[in-house]
Amino acid sequence: MILHTTDTFRWYSFPLFDALPGVVTFVTTRGGVVTDDSFSTDNLGEYTDDAPERVAANRQRLRDALGFDCLAAPHQVHGVEVAAVSRDWQDSPDGDRRQMLEGVDAVMTDRTGIAVAVSTADCVPVLLYDPDHRACAAVHAGWRGMAAHIIRATVESMQARYDTRPARLYAAVGPSIGPDSFEVGDEVVEAFLSAGFDERAVVRRYPSRRSHIDLWAAAVEELEACGVELSHIEVAGICTREHSDEFFSARALGVRSGRFLTGLYFRQEG
Protein backbone atom coordinates (compact mmCIF):
# COMPACT_ATOMS: atom_id res chain seq x y z
CA MET A 1 0.00 0.00 0.00
CA ILE A 2 1.01 3.61 -0.53
CA LEU A 3 1.07 6.06 2.38
CA HIS A 4 -0.43 9.54 1.98
CA THR A 5 -0.16 12.35 4.49
CA THR A 6 -1.46 15.88 4.82
CA ASP A 7 -1.20 18.34 7.66
CA THR A 8 -4.42 16.92 9.11
CA PHE A 9 -4.72 13.27 8.07
CA ARG A 10 -2.83 10.07 7.20
CA TRP A 11 -4.08 7.18 5.06
CA TYR A 12 -3.03 4.44 2.64
CA SER A 13 -4.19 3.59 -0.87
CA PHE A 14 -3.96 0.44 -3.00
CA PRO A 15 -1.48 0.61 -5.93
CA LEU A 16 -3.66 -1.64 -8.10
CA PHE A 17 -6.48 0.89 -7.87
CA ASP A 18 -4.25 3.97 -8.06
CA ALA A 19 -3.54 3.10 -11.68
CA LEU A 20 -7.25 3.23 -12.56
CA PRO A 21 -8.58 6.64 -13.69
CA GLY A 22 -10.84 8.51 -11.30
CA VAL A 23 -10.81 5.88 -8.52
CA VAL A 24 -9.68 6.85 -5.03
CA THR A 25 -9.10 4.23 -2.32
CA PHE A 26 -8.29 4.84 1.31
CA VAL A 27 -7.33 2.88 4.42
CA THR A 28 -7.15 5.11 7.46
CA THR A 29 -4.83 4.60 10.43
CA ARG A 30 -4.84 5.30 14.15
CA GLY A 31 -3.04 8.54 13.32
CA GLY A 32 -1.18 8.46 16.60
CA VAL A 33 -1.38 6.64 19.93
CA VAL A 34 -2.22 8.20 23.28
CA THR A 35 -1.44 6.04 26.31
CA ASP A 36 -4.52 4.41 27.85
CA ASP A 37 -6.77 5.70 25.04
CA SER A 38 -7.87 2.83 22.79
CA PHE A 39 -9.67 5.34 20.55
CA SER A 40 -6.58 7.43 19.85
CA THR A 41 -6.23 9.25 17.65
CA ASP A 42 -8.23 8.95 14.44
CA ASN A 43 -11.10 6.68 15.46
CA LEU A 44 -13.69 6.79 12.65
CA GLY A 45 -16.12 4.22 14.06
CA GLU A 46 -19.48 5.79 14.84
CA TYR A 47 -20.69 2.67 16.62
CA THR A 48 -18.06 2.73 19.36
CA ASP A 49 -18.07 4.23 22.86
CA ASP A 50 -15.94 7.15 21.73
CA ALA A 51 -17.39 10.66 22.01
CA PRO A 52 -19.66 11.20 18.95
CA GLU A 53 -18.35 14.73 18.40
CA ARG A 54 -14.80 13.41 18.30
CA VAL A 55 -15.68 10.79 15.69
CA ALA A 56 -17.59 13.38 13.64
CA ALA A 57 -14.59 15.71 13.70
CA ASN A 58 -12.29 12.89 12.59
CA ARG A 59 -14.63 12.01 9.72
CA GLN A 60 -14.75 15.64 8.65
CA ARG A 61 -10.97 15.75 8.54
CA LEU A 62 -10.98 12.62 6.37
CA ARG A 63 -13.53 14.18 4.03
CA ASP A 64 -11.50 17.39 3.80
CA ALA A 65 -8.31 15.44 3.07
CA LEU A 66 -9.78 13.24 0.33
CA GLY A 67 -12.44 15.52 -1.13
CA PHE A 68 -15.47 13.22 -1.41
CA ASP A 69 -19.01 14.60 -1.04
CA CYS A 70 -20.46 12.20 1.52
CA LEU A 71 -19.61 8.96 3.33
CA ALA A 72 -21.73 5.80 3.29
CA ALA A 73 -20.46 3.59 6.11
CA PRO A 74 -22.99 1.10 7.55
CA HIS A 75 -23.76 -0.23 11.02
CA GLN A 76 -22.35 -3.71 10.50
CA VAL A 77 -23.70 -6.83 12.21
CA HIS A 78 -21.52 -9.64 10.77
CA GLY A 79 -24.29 -10.59 8.36
CA VAL A 80 -24.71 -10.73 4.59
CA GLU A 81 -26.98 -7.76 3.83
CA VAL A 82 -25.86 -5.59 0.93
CA ALA A 83 -27.19 -2.05 0.42
CA ALA A 84 -27.03 0.18 -2.65
CA VAL A 85 -26.65 3.92 -2.15
CA SER A 86 -28.01 6.13 -4.91
CA ARG A 87 -29.26 9.65 -5.47
CA ASP A 88 -32.24 8.98 -3.17
CA TRP A 89 -29.93 8.04 -0.32
CA GLN A 90 -27.69 11.01 -1.01
CA ASP A 91 -30.65 13.42 -0.88
CA SER A 92 -32.15 11.95 2.31
CA PRO A 93 -31.81 13.47 5.81
CA ASP A 94 -28.93 12.15 7.89
CA GLY A 95 -31.21 10.08 10.14
CA ASP A 96 -32.80 8.36 7.15
CA ARG A 97 -29.38 7.66 5.66
CA ARG A 98 -28.29 5.94 8.84
CA GLN A 99 -31.46 3.83 8.95
CA MET A 100 -30.95 2.71 5.35
CA LEU A 101 -27.52 1.37 6.32
CA GLU A 102 -28.58 -0.26 9.60
CA GLY A 103 -27.64 -3.96 9.83
CA VAL A 104 -25.71 -3.86 6.56
CA ASP A 105 -22.27 -5.37 5.92
CA ALA A 106 -21.59 -4.26 2.35
CA VAL A 107 -22.36 -1.01 0.55
CA MET A 108 -22.27 -0.41 -3.20
CA THR A 109 -22.80 2.59 -5.46
CA ASP A 110 -22.36 3.96 -8.95
CA ARG A 111 -22.58 7.59 -7.84
CA THR A 112 -19.64 9.94 -8.20
CA GLY A 113 -18.54 11.56 -4.95
CA ILE A 114 -20.10 9.01 -2.57
CA ALA A 115 -17.41 7.21 -0.61
CA VAL A 116 -18.48 3.70 0.39
CA ALA A 117 -16.53 2.32 3.34
CA VAL A 118 -16.55 -0.26 6.12
CA SER A 119 -15.14 0.05 9.62
CA THR A 120 -12.89 -2.66 11.01
CA ALA A 121 -10.50 -3.54 13.81
CA ASP A 122 -9.29 -7.04 12.74
CA CYS A 123 -12.12 -8.08 10.37
CA VAL A 124 -11.38 -8.14 6.65
CA PRO A 125 -12.31 -5.11 4.53
CA VAL A 126 -12.70 -5.84 0.82
CA LEU A 127 -13.09 -3.27 -1.97
CA LEU A 128 -14.59 -4.06 -5.38
CA TYR A 129 -14.52 -1.94 -8.54
CA ASP A 130 -16.35 -2.51 -11.82
CA PRO A 131 -14.62 -0.37 -14.50
CA ASP A 132 -17.20 -1.12 -17.20
CA HIS A 133 -20.19 0.24 -15.28
CA ARG A 134 -18.26 2.52 -12.91
CA ALA A 135 -19.67 0.82 -9.83
CA CYS A 136 -17.95 -0.10 -6.59
CA ALA A 137 -18.52 -1.74 -3.22
CA ALA A 138 -16.98 -1.94 0.24
CA VAL A 139 -17.42 -5.21 2.14
CA HIS A 140 -17.03 -6.02 5.84
CA ALA A 141 -16.01 -9.68 6.21
CA GLY A 142 -15.49 -10.88 9.74
CA TRP A 143 -15.06 -14.61 10.09
CA ARG A 144 -18.83 -15.11 10.37
CA GLY A 145 -19.54 -13.00 7.31
CA MET A 146 -16.71 -14.61 5.38
CA ALA A 147 -18.03 -18.11 6.16
CA ALA A 148 -21.53 -16.95 5.20
CA HIS A 149 -20.22 -15.74 1.82
CA ILE A 150 -20.70 -11.98 2.20
CA ILE A 151 -18.18 -11.40 -0.61
CA ARG A 152 -20.16 -13.65 -2.94
CA ALA A 153 -23.41 -11.91 -1.95
CA THR A 154 -21.88 -8.54 -2.81
CA VAL A 155 -20.60 -9.65 -6.21
CA GLU A 156 -24.01 -11.13 -7.01
CA SER A 157 -25.69 -7.88 -5.91
CA MET A 158 -23.42 -5.90 -8.23
CA GLN A 159 -24.27 -8.29 -11.06
CA ALA A 160 -27.99 -7.83 -10.46
CA ARG A 161 -27.95 -4.05 -10.05
CA TYR A 162 -25.13 -2.89 -12.34
CA ASP A 163 -24.76 -5.83 -14.74
CA THR A 164 -21.24 -6.34 -13.42
CA ARG A 165 -19.08 -9.01 -15.00
CA PRO A 166 -16.98 -10.64 -12.24
CA ALA A 167 -14.05 -11.26 -14.59
CA ARG A 168 -13.74 -7.50 -15.03
CA LEU A 169 -13.80 -6.65 -11.31
CA TYR A 170 -10.81 -5.33 -9.41
CA ALA A 171 -10.55 -6.27 -5.73
CA ALA A 172 -8.47 -5.22 -2.74
CA VAL A 173 -8.20 -7.05 0.58
CA GLY A 174 -7.23 -4.58 3.29
CA PRO A 175 -5.33 -4.81 6.57
CA SER A 176 -6.91 -7.28 9.00
CA ILE A 177 -5.90 -9.98 11.42
CA GLY A 178 -3.35 -12.30 9.83
CA PRO A 179 -3.22 -16.09 9.99
CA ASP A 180 -0.44 -16.21 12.58
CA SER A 181 -2.58 -14.13 14.97
CA PHE A 182 -6.00 -15.64 14.29
CA GLU A 183 -6.16 -18.67 16.53
CA VAL A 184 -9.66 -20.17 16.58
CA GLY A 185 -11.70 -22.98 18.08
CA ASP A 186 -12.92 -26.07 16.26
CA GLU A 187 -16.35 -24.50 15.73
CA VAL A 188 -14.84 -21.77 13.55
CA VAL A 189 -12.91 -24.30 11.49
CA GLU A 190 -16.10 -26.32 11.05
CA ALA A 191 -17.99 -23.21 9.93
CA PHE A 192 -15.51 -22.67 7.09
CA LEU A 193 -15.39 -26.31 6.06
CA SER A 194 -19.19 -26.57 6.12
CA ALA A 195 -19.33 -23.48 3.90
CA GLY A 196 -17.16 -25.23 1.31
CA PHE A 197 -13.81 -23.50 1.83
CA ASP A 198 -10.64 -25.36 0.90
CA GLU A 199 -9.19 -26.67 4.16
CA ARG A 200 -5.65 -26.73 2.76
CA ALA A 201 -5.89 -23.05 1.85
CA VAL A 202 -7.64 -21.49 4.82
CA VAL A 203 -6.89 -23.72 7.84
CA ARG A 204 -3.44 -23.79 9.38
CA ARG A 205 -2.41 -26.32 12.01
CA TYR A 206 0.27 -24.99 14.35
CA PRO A 207 2.70 -26.94 16.56
CA SER A 208 0.54 -25.95 19.54
CA ARG A 209 -2.17 -28.08 17.88
CA ARG A 210 -4.42 -25.04 17.85
CA SER A 211 -6.00 -24.12 14.53
CA HIS A 212 -5.64 -20.79 12.79
CA ILE A 213 -7.75 -19.41 9.95
CA ASP A 214 -6.18 -17.52 7.04
CA LEU A 215 -8.86 -14.93 6.26
CA TRP A 216 -6.76 -13.42 3.48
CA ALA A 217 -6.66 -16.76 1.68
CA ALA A 218 -10.40 -17.19 2.30
CA ALA A 219 -11.10 -13.80 0.71
CA VAL A 220 -9.01 -14.63 -2.36
CA GLU A 221 -10.70 -18.05 -2.64
CA GLU A 222 -14.12 -16.38 -2.53
CA LEU A 223 -13.17 -13.76 -5.12
CA GLU A 224 -11.76 -16.34 -7.51
CA ALA A 225 -14.82 -18.56 -7.01
CA CYS A 226 -16.94 -15.58 -8.07
CA GLY A 227 -14.90 -15.24 -11.27
CA VAL A 228 -12.52 -12.42 -10.31
CA GLU A 229 -9.13 -12.77 -12.01
CA LEU A 230 -6.22 -13.38 -9.62
CA SER A 231 -4.24 -10.64 -11.39
CA HIS A 232 -7.03 -8.20 -10.42
CA ILE A 233 -6.73 -8.93 -6.68
CA GLU A 234 -4.45 -7.01 -4.31
CA VAL A 235 -3.91 -8.26 -0.76
CA ALA A 236 -2.39 -5.80 1.70
CA GLY A 237 -1.01 -8.63 3.84
CA ILE A 238 -0.79 -6.41 6.94
CA CYS A 239 -1.87 -7.94 10.25
CA THR A 240 -3.74 -5.45 12.39
CA ARG A 241 -2.98 -7.28 15.63
CA GLU A 242 0.75 -7.22 14.91
CA HIS A 243 0.55 -3.56 13.85
CA SER A 244 -1.91 -2.27 16.44
CA ASP A 245 0.22 0.85 16.83
CA GLU A 246 -0.92 1.86 13.34
CA PHE A 247 -4.31 0.13 12.92
CA PHE A 248 -7.04 -0.51 15.45
CA SER A 249 -7.18 -4.14 16.59
CA ALA A 250 -9.87 -5.60 18.84
CA ARG A 251 -7.65 -8.52 19.80
CA ALA A 252 -4.75 -6.28 20.74
CA LEU A 253 -6.65 -3.32 22.23
CA GLY A 254 -9.96 -4.86 23.31
CA VAL A 255 -13.36 -4.80 21.66
CA ARG A 256 -13.91 -1.23 22.87
CA SER A 257 -11.10 0.05 20.66
CA GLY A 258 -11.60 2.44 17.77
CA ARG A 259 -12.18 1.49 14.15
CA PHE A 260 -10.44 2.47 10.94
CA LEU A 261 -12.17 2.87 7.58
CA THR A 262 -11.40 1.19 4.27
CA GLY A 263 -13.25 2.61 1.30
CA LEU A 264 -13.28 4.08 -2.17
CA TYR A 265 -15.06 6.65 -4.28
CA PHE A 266 -15.15 8.04 -7.81
CA ARG A 267 -13.60 11.45 -8.36
CA GLN A 268 -15.50 13.91 -10.56
CA GLU A 269 -13.96 13.75 -14.02
CA GLY A 270 -12.99 16.84 -15.91
Image (cartoon, rainbow, N blue to C red):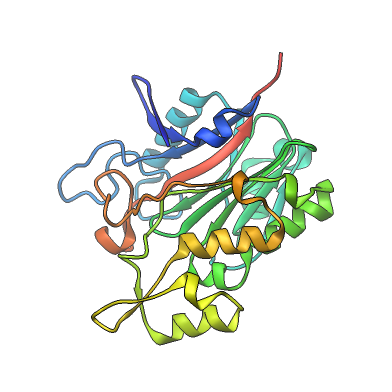
Where residue 2 appears, as percent x and y from the top left, is 42, 31
Q: Does residue 23 lie above or below 82 as drawn?
A: above
Q: Residue at x 68, y 53 (%)?
A: 228
Q: Quadrant of residue 101?
A: bottom right
Q: Is residue 254 visible?
A: no
The C terminus - image quarter: top right
The N terminus - image quarter: top left
Q: Is residue 235 visible?
A: yes
Where residue 220 appears, as percent x and y from the top left, is 56, 58
Tell which residue pokes out farthest to the left in this image.
35
Q: Nearer the viewer, residue 162 or 18?
A: 18
Where residue 174 appears, as percent x and y from the top left, is 47, 48
Q: Does residue 117 lie above or below 14 as drawn?
A: below
Total number of numbered discs in the rendering: 0
Q: Does residue 211 lie above or below 167 as drawn?
A: below
Q: Is 3 left or right of 172, judged from the image as shown? A: left
